[in-house]
Amino acid sequence: MNLNEKVYDISEVGSIEPEGDREIVLQIGPAHPGSGHMRIKAWMDGDIITKVDADIGFVHRTSEWLSERRQFIKAIPIVERIMLPDTVHANLAYVLALEKILDVEPPPRAQYLRSLAAEINRITSHLYGIGLFGIFLGSSTVYMWAFGDREPFIDLMEMLTGARITNSYIVPGGVRWEMPKGFKEKAESTLQYMENRFNDYNDMWVKNPVVEARTVNVGVVDRNRAIKLGVVGPNLRASGVDYDTRKASPYAAYKDIDFEVPRMDHGDTYDRLLIRIEEIKQSIRIIRQILKDIPEGKIIADSIYSQLNPVMKKVFEQQQRVMFPAFFNQMRPASAESIARVEAGRGEIFFYLRTSGDKYPYRFRWVTPSFRNLAYFTDVAVGYKLADLPAIYGSIDYFPPEADR
Amino acid sequence: MIINNEDITKTAQVKEDEKRGIVDIFVTDINALKDVALSLSKMGFDHCLSVTCVDYRSRMSVMWHISSYSKDEYKGHVLQLRIDVDTSKLTPDPNYRAPMINVPSLVEVWKSAEFNEREAHEMFGINFQGHPDLRPILLSEDFYGKWPMRKDFTFDKSGAKYEFE
Amino acid sequence: MGILLLIIWLIQDLLYLIVFPGLIVAMVLVILLIYLERKIAAKVQMRFGPLYVSRKVGGALQSISDLLRFSFQEFILPVGSDSIAFLMAPGFMFAFAMMPLIFIPVGPYYSYLFPSTLTILFSVALITITPIYAIIVGWASDNKFSFIGSLREALLVISYEIPLLLSVIAMVIVYKTLNYIPAVAFQETHLPGIILNPIAALVFIIVAIRSTGRFPFDITEADSELVMGLYTEYSALFFGIGMATPYIELYALSLIFSLLFLGGWWPASGHATGLLAGLFMPGVMVIIKAFIVMIVLVFLRAVYPRYRVDQAIRSGWERIIYLGIIAVIISILEAIII
């Protein structure tokens, strides 16, 4: 018997219409251990899913509405709180869109620090995803391991930015804190720790026969289908599409950094697991490069620095942190529109910002990766079994608060 | 210029903003929208990032942000397919706080626009004609018809009011 | 005088059922096992496990505190449930999980307490009754998740019961008896069953994992799919009973395993008689062996995720059953040789 063989052909099963009373409708969530803050409505024929409807919005926090009624700077904490495992990227995407309107270019050292924070954040985000995938398949060990191994990287972020999760590290024109003393050594030891842990993950999780049986050939999305559904991030690359925003339209310091974009061919649940581990390895490589190559210089653009008053300049010289004057809150960018794209841990964040010369954004639009990955539920899960739904859910690293915004 | 296709420039004004990364394709004729979208899709712009509206009070700007996964030369560009609808002459609808605005749906061209169009529908009251499944997605049912992201939407500041059945 | 002997005999029977190795020892072992399961898994998972209840003894009283909490929780009877079945089924399930212990001797003195020559047959037959009540539990709850859980239980029971019987039959063929006591005596004079027929032991262990819902066969209670499986609608003590039942089953199956495959009470007794040397000392030996088996089985939680139900059923029908048949063939060959 080959447990890994494909059990059902989606094209066949997609046409099944259950007869009579065979159909049952499962309301998975919003209070269900396998749903997160959403409701998955699954129509079942026996054990086979014939239709899925993802009912999201249970944690909609009206971030666009709120941000359109606040000063520009105050939107940074709002977008961060939407994407808690991915805060740096949300912050960075918004600031990139705002900088294009303000016409500010951060200095090279700030660009490198941004990339550094983003890559540490990417590792924590992927570990978060791997851990939740573990508990969805029933492995509490990997869940605990991944969340435990996320901790050193969060400590690293705390050392770099002063906060564990909601850092608000990136501001228009640069970053808020200089890299502290001893950070390089600590970062290097953390990276070495993570590299040693890969063997444990391989033994316990990636090469585990049960994991292979559960994930290989489950939730297959081939290249064309992935493009058509418009999925993003590691899920897209697991389906064999060579696309990474860091390469396609480089931001921060990614122009100068040498890294590879890992890619898988098959696009099943197992590939979506492997690609996250490969991306962690690439992130480690990027962090090492940044720590080696980071240029000296200011961490804030001159145009902003020149506006600081003498006390703030003194604070900046002594403590290497940027204090912002109050008028920063009252800035009125010229009427313009801009877009920004950032490759976050879960995929591409898209920002559209429209200003009208007022204190508040006129239109604040952003699309998070999880929202664009929603098609995985409604389209991909059909034809698989009920027990595959958590496997698919876990593998796409879907985060409901992020999708609901 | 990345857009020099005759079919598109015939019916749309293309404006490129290198610095801010926007290629704006302004379709003046609402009936030509789908044709422009189809020719963009044939060029290789294969997915939709976002469906956005901007409410300029007298007109509503609906825009599809599209990009490409498959063509290397287009990967770094985001096109903004835009259409403006005059909202001053719409007839009021008693079912909704403000009348819906009819715009053709582009889900047939870009499947990835499906959830985005649903969101734009409930937030701005855009009636995407031809959308297969135009239900509200994020907000609760009692918010339907209020179009909260429009600029004329206001809250009762005395506190959140809820009508229980 | 005869009446007095009869009364003593009856009291000994009752003590066998209720104290040793029956209810009380079983419950103590289960409480200890749950604590050890959580503690060992925590060790693997880089955390502490139960700690804050009774910190001085490393949280050992956590399971007792859980038991107390279950006892004093509010019990909720769902409106749509079949209330009689809903209330009765967990009790029956627990009772039938305990019942095989009557027919499992933990020492040679047992033959004086319950004179029977068919103990293997009876104990294995009683083990197969428990799942019926598990199915009733799922049906009575009037919950789709419970219902799916009970259907899964039914499918899995059907596909794993035959290998269990095949594995036991294989050993019966080798020992040429349906009674545990001669079977243990056979192992004392020859070799332990696990060496005589390792494939039968393997099949038995896999079926034990399956029928007690340990990982990777934690399918009927898969929390990311079915909330809590069969027990979704249960609360309070009924939930506690439902959770304890698989552990009692595990205890019974481990006892059978240690008797059939691990040499029973060897080396604790020769052919001793009397309550202490004939029942208590060998019983402790058997229970220690069984407890080690139990710890190994619950440790799997830290290693494996869970299989999908169709994969488990397939491996039942397409792999384990053939292993069972091979085990029987090996036993037949051995029986001819010995």
Image: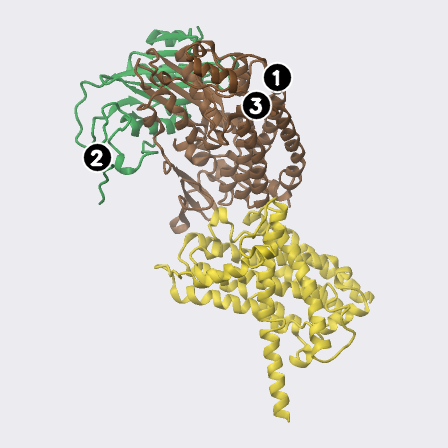
Q: Is residue A359 above or below residue A385?
A: above
Query: Where in the figure is residue C282, as x and y percent of width and height?
Result: 72, 71
Query: Where in the figure is residue C32, as x and y percent of width and height?
Result: 60, 60
* Picture colour for chain A: brown
- As helix, strand or loop, the secondary structure at mark 1 comes to loop
Q: How many marks?
A: 3
x 47%, y 60%: residue: C69
Q: Report in which chain the residue with disc 2 lies.
A: B
Residue type for callout 1? Asp
x 57%, y 31%: residue: A153
- As helix, strand or loop, the secondary structure at mark 3 comes to loop
Residue type for callout 3? Pro
Mark 1 Cα within 10 Å, few/some/many (few <14, many 20+)? few
Q: Which chain is yellow?
A: C
* Residue annotated with mark 2: B158
Query: Where in the figure is residue A355, as x and y percent of width and height?
Result: 33, 15
